[in-house]
Amino acid sequence: MRGRPFLAVVLAIVLSAFALGLGGWWLVWQRSPLRLGHHALVMPRAARFVPAQAALSLYLFSDGEEPVAYARAVAPPRQRRAAAATVARLRDGAFAAAGLDYRNELAAWLAPEIGLALLDDSGSSGDWLLVLRSRDDDGARRFLQRFWQSRSLAGTDLQVSSYRGMGLISGRGALVGSEPVPLATALVDDDLVLLASGRGVLERALDVSQIDDLNQAGQPRLVRGLERLQEGAALLVARPTAMRDWFALPLPEDGDGRPALLLAAVQPEGLGLRLRGLLELPVLPAGLEPVDAGRREALLAGLRGHPSRLALLQNPAALQQSPLVRPLLSRLALDAARDGAAGPLPALVAAADAGPLLLADGPQGWLLGSPLDQPPPEALEPALAAAGLIEAPLEVGERSLQVWTHLEAGPSRGGAPRAGRGGAAAADQLQAPLAGWRLVEGDLAWWGRNLALVEERGDRPGQQLRQRLDALGAPRAPLQWVVDGEVARELLRDWQPWRLLSVLAGGGLDGPVQGLALALEPDGQGLAWQAHLDFDA
């Protein structure tokens, strides 16, 4: 009986230690920069001031220091300073574009969250609104006093007015050495600073904040999207104008009158960035059936060569008929098929294939993998004949291939034309270069142009690309695509948002990029998509 009090004391001590440890862990986690990758998405306060029809809005659920600390925490020891400096340059450049000096004007008081909206169009000259939150009431007030005091001393004429019971200050301001631009500010609830590209823009923001139907915070589609996405360090909302101008998405014109809407959650994940989003469309593309998991694994297992990009498509023949998906396929997946140097065969196969179809491209040329009857070779015969291709059998080692060649005139042997009767040059010799081949392996058919790919299997070729594809966690998505670092850097350099980010950061963003993966699949009234951008370790 005497042992019971002792056991009770021991149990109490253990439970107390466990509680203290759990509480300490929670405090450490709350202060950890790694928490940025697991931020729960909630409706931003700034969304109350953003008009529902705003072309583009971006909400950051962090202050100006957390992204820098996160980059420093996840980077290898030798690269921590460089990684933190890159993110800091991007941050400083973004605020400088709005005429703000982050280190001297914002760092001391800025708190999570930050909201930015382009209201009427996505051009650089459009109206914009910036919403900043202060850690305390005094921080926001001191900022506004110093902000306009410094602009006033620089010769800016200020106008002080009242609107909806709030004080508005407007004038022209800029950083030293920059062209002054119209600016207007207001203080809301003592801790929110509204900074806009003019007094009219600011008055519009205050107007819509009074009616839920007119601002983004009161939009049911946005509320549902946040519930679906759940986590993210940043949220992007884009309407058709911005989707066309910024992201080059050719949206379908017909539908039920419901405008397209793009939601994207940005979530840091180790050394990479994961983007998850929803694209609500008035009309869904046809042919978005899920990929059979067994066929997918069989195609990836049969891959050969050293590809620098892979794409897996379900029903590519139907997907290419969609005005939204067709340009995406042409840019991301079917570059090899569209390349005139690749010959007509890959484009013909993709146009007749009901899928799934695996496309690979690399230094050794293009490679396609499909089910045995997708498409049957005889279905391609009329188009191949019209392209001047001739079919023939060919033995390569112990493998029997079906090949297509085309006749063309080539130089005579020796490189110089031979003289015929009367001194005329003889016709050049005919040559039959290879346009493509087809190999049957089990219930799969492989198509390519370089005969070296017939025998070259290697040890799990394209292993890194396949790992990136699997990391997306969407094995049944009807469009799956992944590229290595070199191809990813080339694509990003041509993408307008990436060019803008590079300018704000002073360059140097694409160098560490090591890969990019994307998956797209139907989801209710639109498309669910996710992408992963890998950076150098």
Image (cartoon, helix red, strand yellow):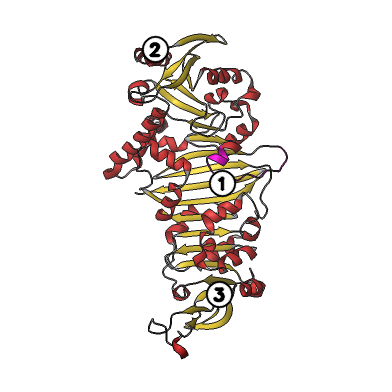
Q: Residue at x 62, y 26 (%)?
A: 218
Q: Where is mark 3, residue-wise?
A: 438
Q: Which residues are magenta?
A: 242-258
Indicate the amino acid at tag 2. Answer: Gln
Say left or right for 321 vs 177.
right
Q: Position of residue 378 (x, y in %)?
A: 66, 75
Q: In this rendered view, identify the residue nearer to me: 62 or 93.
A: 93
Mark drawn on residue 145: 2
Q: Residue at x 58, y 76 (%)?
A: 389
Q: Which is more foreground, mark 3 or mark 1?
A: 3
Q: Position of residue 267 (x, y in %)?
A: 47, 40
Q: Where is mark 1, residue-wise?
A: 529
Q: Residues within 10 Å of mark 1 (few under 14, many from 20)?
A: many
Indicate the amino acid at tag 1. Answer: Trp
Say left or right for 80 vs 192.
left
Q: Residue at x 49, y 59 (%)?
A: 310
Please identify the residue farthest to the right as the structure is shown: 256
Q: Position of residue 3 (x, y in %)?
A: 39, 33
Please determine whether, in this image, residue 341 is positioned above or below residue 229: below
